[in-house]
Amino acid sequence: MTKEDRSNVASVDTTQMPVIGPGHSFASVTDKISSIVLTHRTPKGWFIGLALSFSLVMILSGAVGLLLVKGVGVWGINIPVAWGFAIVNFVWWIGIGHAGTLISAILLLLNQRWRTSINRFAEAMTLFAVMCAGMFPLLHLGRPWVFYWLFPYPNTMNVQPQFRSPLVWDVFAVSTYFMVSLLFWFVGLIPDLATLRDRARSLWGKVIYGALAMGWRGSARHWHRYEIAYLLLAGLATPLVVSVHTVVSFDFTIAILPGWHSTIFPPYFVAGAIFSGFAMVLTLAIPLRKFYGLEDFITTRHLDNMAKVMLATGLIVAYGYLMEFFMAWRSGNKFEWYMTMNRLRGPYWPVYWGVLLCNVALPQLLWSRRLRRSALALFLLSLVINTGMWLERYLIVVVSLARDFMPSAWGMYRGTVWDYAVFIGTLGFFVFMMFLFIRFLPAISIFEMRTLLPEAEVKGEAKEGVKWKEGQPSTV
Amino acid sequence: MERRPAVYGLMAEFDNPTSLLDATSRAYREGYRRMDAYTPFPVEGLSEALDFRRTRVPLIVLLGGLVGCFGGFFLQYYIAAIYWPIIVGGRPFNSWPAFIPVTFELTVLCAALSAFLGMLALNGLPQPHHPVFNAPRFEMASRDRFFLCIEATDPKFEAAATRRFLESLGAREVSDVED
């Protein structure tokens, strides 16, 4: 994009904007994306980023090591706030993951072709976010080494999971979510791994990418089955992603605690998940396109569209807050009303006002077209929204637990240094995994980018040619 | 004993999806059946041009989903009502509404695994080697070239005549594929 284009950007209608920069061909798209992976000259910035994030992973290892040795007492949790940071972080991370599935599955089913250049790394983001999310409930178990007790298996103790508990539903929801996201991501990668196999010059590259590509040769019959399988996976992932955050919200709503026991939770949790997830996609995409010069592939149109999704889901979240407030008043239940007042004026008031500022007030800036198309402004706003959504989960988990029905059972909670260490450690782990992913796998789907080019469309007579055939279709 | 032909087939190379689709349709009309096209991305209408319209992938996914659904529900029913009956919150042993979330998750899990494994199995993958990789410049099939291979096992295949036919379709180059 030239300077003049950039100044005109605010006045152009989005649907007129291309999803891929001009002047690209099948070869240039392939070479540009695969060169990030196959280059021998790894950029210095990559090493610096990897080292920084790896040092945070070391903090994570240290904090988890201490936790295993001493027990969950090193965290700030106690009765009444037994959940604390662990569950706040779990819900926050899993919510971030949801944008990846939304972009890859739901936008695929809705035939939104602009998703193509962002779906691959959004899916990777999903996987790494779910890994981070999964760590927290497992560490919170207190004895994480017996985590497999969560699954039904024949055992000498003769005990089995209690399937009426939402916490058991959560185990199945999150592990299914991870598995299906992994399959979806890997299926999408197969043709690109074949491209890397064919273009790698080093022996190791050929062997490893070759093994992972499993002998993919781009046969028309294979593509046919591939596309159907991919579409079916998208169709399965779509209700799955809605169910996962619904089940996460059941962890709260099935209990009778004021601030948890609410029927608005499932839709408002799903909207909040997508809201924070898109914010995280922007947090990752904006530096990625800048440092690797991918502005032709992740265009202003992508930023604009993602900002619109954030605005829409942010409004649903705001509606959720409003309804919580309204129902607390309308129900006439004094515990519900006290909970609301406690949020506004209680000891944790900065959390609630922070949520309103970050998730309701500031996202309204997205109504401005100029702001939606400014990478820097969106990057900053995405950080604000990520913070706001973390605070929202803190509000739900901690502020509700700290003051329930009986004042004699109230208590204050504050995270300890180890709570922060584990949280910052998972942030480091997430970034560390993203760095490895960008370096060793194509961060943008190469084969889908090829289909966006005008040459990919079959023209003229050939298109008619396929219609003449008679006879019964054969099943192979 | 069937004599294996020394060549696997003849590979024609094209520049763009339009010429490939055109060539494939014409080869089919000419009577060739044992052939396949190789492309860097899914080309609309190409599998139809090869008269390959239906696959069993959806059926496999449906069956996988049903196994996950009924198996998942039965697992919970068996554990909660027969193997380890325990009263929780005064609910019946077979408190089926509480079993729906896990039933749903297992349905999706089994269906997704069958989509993945079914697609690979029907495609015959993983497959360490295939003769088409012997074709010159075949590595371009994952970049920007489009290939059509008429296999030697096709009843209408005759090395010289088929080569002439492929050349007449406007291929950049036609080459033998060793078996």
Image (cartoon, coloured by chain):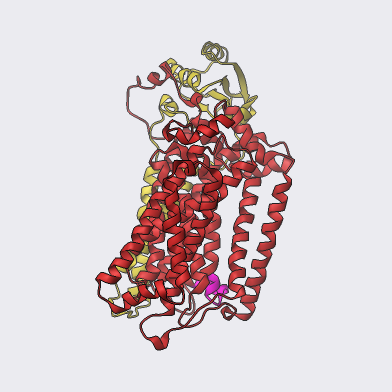
Chain colours: A red, B yellow
When asked about the image quadrant of residue B85, the answer is: bottom left
The quarter of the picture where the N terminus of chain B appears is: top right
Question: Relative to the observer, which residue lies in front, B161 or A419?
Answer: A419
Residue drawn at the location 65% of the way across and 51% of the way down? A436
Quarter residue A470 falls in? top left
Q: Count the marks.
A: 0
Q: Residue at x 41, y 50 (%)?
A: A311
Residue A406 counted in the magenta span: no
Above or below, comparing residue B150 to residue A307 in the picture: above
Residue A232 x %, y %: 40, 45
Question: Furthest-bottom residue in view?
Answer: A408
Q: Which quadrant would the C terminus of chain B be assigned to in this image?
A: top right
Q: Is residue A100 visible?
A: yes
- Residue A340 percent across, percent down from the top left: 36, 72
By secondary structure, the bulk of the magenta-drawn segment is best described as: helix
Is A429 left or right of A321, judged from the image as shown?
Answer: right
User: Which residues lie in the magenta part?
Assistant: A138-149
Q: What residue is shown at x 36% (from left), y 55% (from top)?
A: A316
Residue A184 drawn at (x, y percent):
49, 48
| Position of A214 relative to A472 (above/below) | below
Residue B134: quarter of image: top right
Q: Does the image show residue B68?
A: no
Query: Does residue A337 appear left or right of residue A204 in this picture?
Result: left
Q: Quick check: A120 above or below A1?
A: below
Viewer-side residue, A112 vs A161: A112
Q: Residue at x 54, y 52 (%)?
A: A380
Tell me where residue A243 appears, x and y as whole percent: 38, 58
